[in-house]
Image: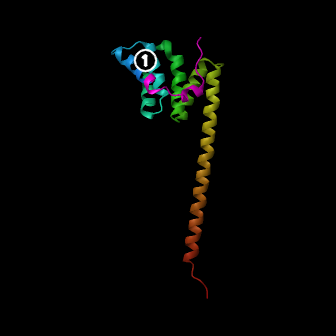
Amino acid sequence: METLPHVREAEISLSEDELNLLRDNYRSEGAKPRPQTRFNYAWALVRSRTRPDQEEGLQLLHQMYSELPSRRRECLYYLALGEYKLQNYKNARKYNQTLLEHEPHNSQALELERIINRKIKREGFVGMAILFVTVLTVGLVTAVVVKRRQPTST
């Protein structure tokens, strides 16, 4: 069983020349590129710095997942990585959990699960802090407005 890359590898973008080489290989194979060519290109796109490339990479991985049952294991992990990179943490968790259902001891998927859960928890804390500050600000503004409308006693 081949090992999967660690999460940090998704953050390492290929050079423009490397991406173009994979793109050219993918296109040169016509309407039905070989699975490995498609997969290499999809992974390169997911690792790209641009969101449209990343989304295209996820789209290719989705197609491969549907069309190639023999590649589903790795597609699930790479879909989880791609969704994580796009900050779609719920989708990332869904794909990763599906992989863990089949491979509960997969160290890379377990690492990704911890990282996703940490991000979700951190976003929850940030959301709560924003809500708290908003409520506090509205309360202060309301208090100032009410105080200004009260007649002064002389």
User: 150 above or below 98?
Assistant: below
Please, which residue is most extreme toward the bottom here? 154
Q: Residue at x 40, y 21 (%)?
A: 23
Name the amino acid, label 1. Answer: Arg
Q: Nearer the viewer, residue 27 or 110?
A: 27
Q: Quadrant of the N terminus?
A: top right
User: 74 above or below 45?
Assistant: above
Q: How is the image coloured?
A: rainbow
Q: Position of residue 45 (x, y in %)?
A: 45, 26
Q: Secondary structure at mark 1?
A: helix
Q: Residue at x 48, y 14 (%)?
A: 69
Highlighted magenta segment, given as a residue range: 1-18
Q: Position of residue 71 (x, y in %)?
A: 50, 15
Please, which residue is most extreme toward the left here? 31
Q: Quadrant of the C terminus?
A: bottom right
- In this image, 105 relative to 87: left or right? right
Q: Residue at x 60, y 24 (%)?
A: 6
In the picture of the structure, the residue carrying the numbered disc 1 is 38
